[in-house]
């Protein structure tokens, strides 16, 4: 049987010399955390992890990689869920970890921007903005670990997309090292710029297949003077959609979150996440976590959220509701929501769907999607929650109680195919915020318009003719 020869030790030494022995990882125990993703679904092998500390070192690494046709897999905080940050099993791909590029280069309060390096932790960016009287609104469950470079490379979404947009919309400029080692310095703070192609947006969402983002100019916004949170119980997704229409009409841009949560998602969280309590007095089939922000005052935000909930009660849409009485209670509400992905793990195998459909189609999608799930595994348990305000749902499926985990996960593709068929019929997306990576590559190629795939391949070939950048991902 043919085997792939290992990377020559002399070549590994050349790569190591660029960063120094201290920042080149070769020991198996030290390599291990870089070789498996959080859910354990994707793993790989690599002889070397490089941890550059400067843009010049990244440039030298990629130049050598192109010259020697050595595949490079960029990795940030290793929190991705589709295998985009994982090497393959050949042992010939070198991991380039960006964690040491972690400086905040500049905060410009007049321009409302912050220039950060790719390895800055998302939560650090949030805290730095807060300390300077600003808000960086990208918010994810993994924000204590994930890094800005990965957020941009996957075009991360999260809970703030409704009001502030996803990572792409929060990025004004980038610094990128190309596979040739050339550095594109596009760290501009401009909100209006029509000088040719928007190169920045080729790299945001490209999952490291065209180059490596080493720094970015992030957009900041004024901190709200008031922020109020409500936990609301409802009978159905349609009731939630009708309440969303009321909230949007009343609050406009002040509606900063509208999260839809199925009862089972809450139940799993209450069962498995310590120090959590049900915000409502009794069980409800569906829940909404709603946040209202005001640039005027806390009183204005409070009045507005009370009016929205009150109108929902009068219309028969709201069955029960609790308004957070203080910051700690509001944070407790958000802890429930942000823990839901992790709360599924103790229940056994979970098949994930990160989908988006038009907001108006959400109730119909949930009904038809649930039917599709039952057609594959009749006793599977649907766990649905997500960002209803922007049409993105985590339509996850947990194995039947007492079922066999491996047998259930063996039907991953079959389940994906069934649910994604409903998504496509509603002109939605099979990947709303997690990316393509290894998980959805084949499905993207099989289902996207052929012209779109051809254009992506042409772009890939133009930027990376040697094919070294994160091979096997996206296309």
Image: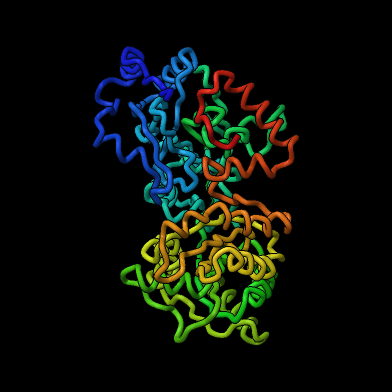
> Quick one: quadrant of the C terminus?
top right
**Dividing the picture into quarters, in which one does residue 168 lie?**
top right
Residue nearest the observer in this picture, 159 or 433: 433
Question: How is colour applied across the structure in the image?
Answer: rainbow
Please give the name of the residue rendered at 31% of the width and 16% of the height, measured from the top-left corner.
9
In the rendered image, is residue 81 in sight? yes
Q: Position of residue 205 (x, y in %)?
A: 57, 39
**Residue 387: x %, y % from top left:** 57, 61
Asked whether residue 120 appears in the rendered view, the answer is no
| Count of all numbered marks drawn on residues in the image | 0
Above or below — where is 104 with respect to 37?
above
Q: Nearer the viewer, residue 36 or 132?
A: 36
Q: Is residue 87 above or below residue 256?
A: above
Which residue is drawn at the image coordinates 58% and 55% (left, top)? 414
Determine whether, in the image, residue 217 is placed left or right of residue 406: right
- Of residues 427 and 401, the one drawn nearer to the viewer in this rendering: 401
Q: Nearer the viewer, residue 467 or 88?
A: 88
Q: Is residue 233 left or right of residue 20?
A: right
Q: Position of residue 294 (x, y in %)?
A: 56, 65
Q: Which residue is pictured at 59% across the width and 65% down the height?
A: 373
* Residue 271 quadrant: bottom left
Q: Which quadrant does the N terminus fall into? A: top left
């Amino acid at each position: 049987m043919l085997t792939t020869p290992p990377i020559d030790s002399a070549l590994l030494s050349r790569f190591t010399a660029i960063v120094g022995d201290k920042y080149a990882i070769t020991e198996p125990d030290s390599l291990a955390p870089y070789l498996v993703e959080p859910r354990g679904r994707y793993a790989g092998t690599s002889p070397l992890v490089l941890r550059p500390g400067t843009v010049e070192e990244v440039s030298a690494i990629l130049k050598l990689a192109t010259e020697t046709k050595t595949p490079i897999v960029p990795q940030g905080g290793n929190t991705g869920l589709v295998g985009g940050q994982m090497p393959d099993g050949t042992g010939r791909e070198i991991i380039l970890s960006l964690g040491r590029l972690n400086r905040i280069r500049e905060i410009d309060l007049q321009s409302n921007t912050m220039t950060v390096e790719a390895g800055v932790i998302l939560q650090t960016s949030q805290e730095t903005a807060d300390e300077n009287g600003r808000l960086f609104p990208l918010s994810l469950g993994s924000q204590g670990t994930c890094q800005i470079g990965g957020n941009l490379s996957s075009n991360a979404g999260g809970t703030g997309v409704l009001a502030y947009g996803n990572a792409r919309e929060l990025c004004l400029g980038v610094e990128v090292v190309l596979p040739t080692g050339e550095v594109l310095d596009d760290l501009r703070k401009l909100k209006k710029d029509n000088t040719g192609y928007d190169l920045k947006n080729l790299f945001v969402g490209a999952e490291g297949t065209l180059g490596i983002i080493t720094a970015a100019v992030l957009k900041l916004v004024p901190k709200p003077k008031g922020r109020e949170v409500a936990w609301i119980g409802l009978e159905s997704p349609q009731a939630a959609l009708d309440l969303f229409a009321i909230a949007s009409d009343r609050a406009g841009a002040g509606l900063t979150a509208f999260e839809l949560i199925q009862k089972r998602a809450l139940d799993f969280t209450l069962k498995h996440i310590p120090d959590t309590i049900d915000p409502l007095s009794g069980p409800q089939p569906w829940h909404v976590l709603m946040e209202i922000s005001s640039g005027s005052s806390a009183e204005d935000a409070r009045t507005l959220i009370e009016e929205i909930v009150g109108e929902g009660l009068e219309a028969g849409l709201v069955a029960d509701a609790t308004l957070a009485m203080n910051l700690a209670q509001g944070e407790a509400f958000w802890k429930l929501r942000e823990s839901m992905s992790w709360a599924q793990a103790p229940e056994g195998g979970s098949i994930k769907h990160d989908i988006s459909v038009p907001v108006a189609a959400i109730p119909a999608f949930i009904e038809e999607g649930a039917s599709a799930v039952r057609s594959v595994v009749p006793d599977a348990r649907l766990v649905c929650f997500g960002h209803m305000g922007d049409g993105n749902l985590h339509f996850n499926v947990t194995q039947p109680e007492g079922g066999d985990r491996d047998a259930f996960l063996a039907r991953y593709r079959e389940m994906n195919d069934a649910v994604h068929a409903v998504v496509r019929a509603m002109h939605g997306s099979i990947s709303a915020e997690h990316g393509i990576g290894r998980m959805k590559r084949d499905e993207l190629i099989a289902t996207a318009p052929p012209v779109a795939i051809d254009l992506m391949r042409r772009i890939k070939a133009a930027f990376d003719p040697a094919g070294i950048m994160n091979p096997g991902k996206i296309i």
